[in-house]
Image: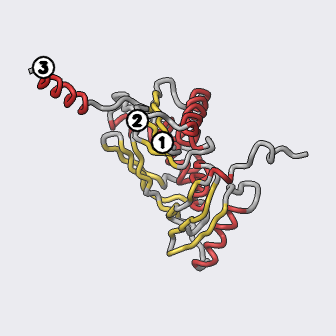
């Protein structure tokens, strides 16, 4: 009888979820976690009610917990993306609704979009269960991104579908447009660190190559979308931590 009870107990324990970090962390993962936690603790734009739980496995960072707003969650992803060694970021965190009804969210989103860039009324919004759909037209990708960014700050917004159409057109053919995107990524004061190859198929830009930080993947995608004629980005960039300049190499004599 005692053996049967022991077997039942072990079987029940096996069904329980394992606590976080049930297996030893590698030294690299432990260092990444410490750096990410410090970066999040220093951030002043995450909101007082943001409570994120982080895990790291072989350089893959997982963000769980809750965020005060969608804007706060996206800022946390960018903060984490600045840490060397992170290869990818998986977001499973939830954004708090704060009990705000859709009708109030819609009013707040409409007020957020009342900025000079959208004074023509070219952007419209609808809300369903905290999920916002943005439609209409703008003259540039930067305006499209601005509309999404301002909407993400509204309390109660948990997701955004940005279907705003950019009206700026280009007469460039695909090879020329690919070179324009590559030039945007690699040239000038706003160049994104990394090694890039760009190809175009219609209005879709495919990015291949390597970047030193996960944040650089985000920046490269945004940069490519800023080029007139690019409507979508297929981001196949790989994070290669070996491209991060060492502290000694970054010091100029």
How much space separates mark 3 and mark 1, taking CA atoms? 40 Å
Mark 1, secondary structure of its residue: strand
| 191 versus 249 height, above or below | below
**Residue 144 appears in the figure:** yes
How much space separates mark 3 and mark 2, taking CA atoms? 48 Å
Residue 173, percent across and down? Answer: 59, 79
How much space separates mark 2 and mark 1, taking CA atoms? 23 Å
**3 or 1: tag closer to the N-terminus:** 3
Residue at 62% x, 28% y is 42
Kindly indicate whether the residue at mark 2 contacts the one at mark 3 (C-beta within 8 angstroms). Answer: no
Residue 159, percent across and down? Answer: 40, 44
Mark 2, secondary structure of its residue: strand
The residue labelled by disc 3 is 2
**Residue 65 appears in the figure:** no
**3 or 2: tag closer to the N-terminus:** 3
**2 or 1: tag closer to the N-terminus:** 1
Residue at 72% x, 54% y is 190
The residue labelled by disc 1 is 57
The residue labelled by disc 2 is 95
| 16 versus 181 height, above or below | above
Query: Which numbered circle lies on residue 92?
Result: none
């Amino acid at each position: 009888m005692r053996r049967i009870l022991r077997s039942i107990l072990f079987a029940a324990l096996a069904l329980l979820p394992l606590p976080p970090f049930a297996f030893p962390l590698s030294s690299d993962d432990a260092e990444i976690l410490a750096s990410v936690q410090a970066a999040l603790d220093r951030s002043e734009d995450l909101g007082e009610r943001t409570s994120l739980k982080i895990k790291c496995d072989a350089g893959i960072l997982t963000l769980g917990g809750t965020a005060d707003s969608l804007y706060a969650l996206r800022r946390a992803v960018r903060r984490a993306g600045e840490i060397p060694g992170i290869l990818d970021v998986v977001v499973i965190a939830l954004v708090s609704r704060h009990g705000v009804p859709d009708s109030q969210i819609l009013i707040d989103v409409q007020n957020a979009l009342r900025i000079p860039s959208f004074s023509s009324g070219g952007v419209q919004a609808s809300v369903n269960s905290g999920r916002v759909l943005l439609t209409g037209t703008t003259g540039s990708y930067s305006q499209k991104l601005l509309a999404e960014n301002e909407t993400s700050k509204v309390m109660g917004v948990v997701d955004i579908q940005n279907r705003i159409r950019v009206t700026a057109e280009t007469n460039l053919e695909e090879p020329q447009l690919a070179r324009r995107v590559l030039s945007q990524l690699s040239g000038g004061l706003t160049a994104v660190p990394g090694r890039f190859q760009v190809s175009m198929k219609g209005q879709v830009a495919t990015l291949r190559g390597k970047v030193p930080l996960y944040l650089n993947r985000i920046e490269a995608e945004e940069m490519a979308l800023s080029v007139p004629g690019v409507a979508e980005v297929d981001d196949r960039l790989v994070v290669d931590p070996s491209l991060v300049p060492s502290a000694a190499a970054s010091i100029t004599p």
